[in-house]
Image (tube, helix red, strand yellow):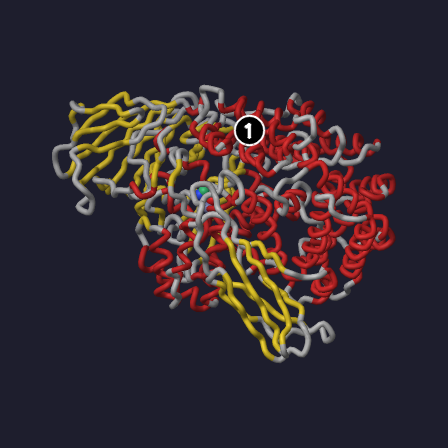
Amino acid sequence: PPEIRREDYRPFPWLVPETRLEFELGLESTRVRSKLTVARNAKADHSPTIRLNGDGIEATSVMVDGEPAQAFTMDGSDLILTLPGEAHEIAIETEIDPSANSQLMGLFASNGMLCTQCESEGFRRITFFPDRPDVLSVFTVRLSGAKAQFPILMCNGNRVDEGEDGDDHWAEWHDPWPKPSYLFALVAGDLLARTDSFTTMNGREVELNVWVREGDLDRTEHAMESLKRSMKWDEETFGREYDLDLFNIVAVSDFNMGAMENKGLNVFNTKYVLADPETATDGDFDAVEGVIGHEYFHNWSGNRITCRDWFQLSLKEGFTVLRDQLFSQDMHSEPVKRIEDVRVLRGVQFPEDSGPLAHPIRPDSYREISNFYTSTVYNKGAEVIRMMRTMAGEEAFRKGTDTYFDRHDGEAATCEDFITSIEDGAGLDLKQFRLWYSQAGTPKVTADLSHDNGEAVLRLGQQVPSTPGQPNKKPMPIPLKIALFDRETGKNSGEQLLILDSDTAEHRFAGFDKKPVLSINRGFSAPVTIQRDIDRDELLFLAAKDDDPFARYEAMQDLITGHLVASASGDLGDDERVSARADIATALSAVIADGSLEDLMRGELLLMPSQSYIGEQLELADPGRIHAERESLKAAIGTSLHDELVQLHSRVSDVPFSMDAQAKGARKVKTVALTYLAAASPELAETMAAAQYDAADNMTDRQGALMVLTGLEGVERTNKLLDFYNRYEGNALVIDKWFALQASSLHPNVVEHVKALADHPDFTLRNPNRVRSLYMAFAANPHGFHIETGEGYRMIGDLILELDPINSQTAARFVPPLGRWRRIEAGRAAMMRDQLDRIAAFDKLSRDTYEQVSRSIG
Ligand code: DPP
Ligand code: ZN
């Protein structure tokens, strides 16, 4: 497959002011008639031909200006027409089989309904079209089909007409806003809606619907409330108002992504719509709200202003992730949300940035764009824009985004357009800052504080590591929030923002008669790793006293990570181990006892850093060893804090269920306490977890208890797994949890369990949620995936080969875990590499998997 390069971008030679589509819908056969009006694009180089992209479709008729087209040729799957004049009308017919579409791109069938997914290049699987985001067209669509099978017919925009025709019926939809083909959507099926309304800031009455299958309606309240909150928040925070009379959300159970922001007709994975306390955890509730917000916010950052080309994906995704993060921060606890977001960044994006698939947030080339819907484009993209906000301040940043929305409304824009708008509107100079868009790799910042003659002296350094294709890097502006603490008083002298924009820098702070304690990258002001010269006493001080909640969390994490990195590298004596563990236990004990902390925050402070985060700190990680050290530390903590943990569990068990922060916090620490006890006293933990399971009146407690039990060997494991299955049989999202809990468990036989689950009658490779619930959970379980026999790697290798022909987008997502081989000890690395070689040798790989595997072998 060819490499597509950003620098090769050329505007499309034709405009498509109007598109008319007619669908005769059927699950096995859908006929599509398109009519495009096209006119020469005066802003592009003239071309006598027009390229209409296609993928796996055939034209049964091609007409130009009402006559059968004389001159058309195929170039691969694209259709090329010669157009002599200034303006023409093109009419094309295709016929497709949605039921055969297992890739879930284009038009596909799911549970008897029909729906679409067109981003990035799915529209070309429906009809021939200039399927690129810079071709904007006004769509009018007529849908027709059997009334009984498809009682509901929906498309983008507003319904303008409808009628009946015997057993069939039809509806015509018109979207007044010009849009690229990737935002096209249609849905046809037997659906029910929760309906509500929202009045916008200028008094526009908007009808809101959340469409689901019968039986799911009573789990849509949270989605609807989240939607209304999103609409209000975007008006208040970014001045953005909704622009149609109707907003529809449809939940489908077979979906590659989380959700899709199609204009006026968002299509969602059921996972991000359905929630009630009995079946969804607190985390699920938050995720529903976050994704509903995310897709809604795209109406401005994505739809009103879209991307010129797919290299600009972060223009809409990075910005929209930042917007959804700020929304969730405002709805709940700001520091806890910040910690959660940083955990995702470190858990997924940092490994990506230090591995063979590293790429800048604005990539320079790709073979398959689906592979670039990455944590780098999304999460690092959000961090980069957040840094602009930090440097500008909230008010000036808002002026920058206002400038962006005013200036580029209705356009297909670039990241450069965004940066320039922020520069002009917010009054920032972002010349050097643009490097964040072009350089991959997580910068390493060193921070060394000393004391000299009444002054604190902070020496900073930065280094951006080399990444594939980018051996040499330039220093970037890194905004670092810092504070200096007096050990005795526990006070700091005020937070400051330093911008480190050179390789090294020195800052002097007067008025210190002894060396203060450095708190740095407060609030995680920059997406970098910090190597600070700090001793354990200072970390203990910050873990107990830092007034920035993120920095306090960070001190706690550093304390534990530092110890585990040293012990997993083997350079730790017995005495050191004992004293480090004692310090960690002391710090955790203080967190348990701290009456000023909310339980939600307490839960964060008590969490162990993940195994993958610890592995990231090592040049070569030995996953077996890290796992053993981490479990052994958990056991040591569970032993030395036994009474405190039991008391903590008992205190929070008395908090009655509600969705407020206090009750959510109680549920969070409840399960965290159990995880430590499980490592130290498995029998006691088994009894406590079984009791928590039985007493549970919500999924958070029930899932937490079952999570702990799946890692233990006792009889309650079997009992409760069986109970859980019987209780929720037929509820796909909860059965996904049942698979995922077993696949991510600490149980010694996890590999055998996963193998057996793959043969379970409820398992299928055709449903992406189910595939991810078993195999993504397993690939993210270091103890199973990295089992020393190499069996875990082989299972993922087998899965990729089997899934690739069915759903290549989902299959390719399993390559990155194997691609980490360069950072893993030699024995396992060779086995991981073997799997990549075995996949690469297969001659019928999809473009998705081919690209990921070849880059990973490198
Ligand atoms: N639906 C995906 C998202 O919102 C892709 N646009 O991120
Ligand atoms: Zn998005």
Mark 1: is the Cβ under 8 angstroms from ligand 1?
no
Residue 326 in sight in this render: no
Mark 1 residue element:
loop
Residue drawn at (52%, 29%) of the image = 811
**Which residue is at the far front?**
453
Q: Position of residue 89 (x, y in %)?
A: 19, 34
Q: Residue furthest left?
A: 85
Q: Which residue is disc 1 drawn over?
A: 767
Of residues 33 and 579, the one drawn nearer to the viewer in this rendering: 579
Give me the residue at 74% from left, 74% from top.
Answer: 488
Badge 1 local density, few (<14 within 10 Å), some, or many (20+)? some
Q: Position of residue 817 (x, y in %)?
A: 58, 35
Tell me if residue 192 comes above or below residue 652 in the rendering.
Answer: above
Does residue 818 lie above or below 302 as drawn? Answer: above
- Amino acid type at circle 1 is Asn
Q: Is residue 565 visible?
A: yes
- Furthest toward the top, the residue is 843
**Rendered-image quadrant of the N terminus:** top left
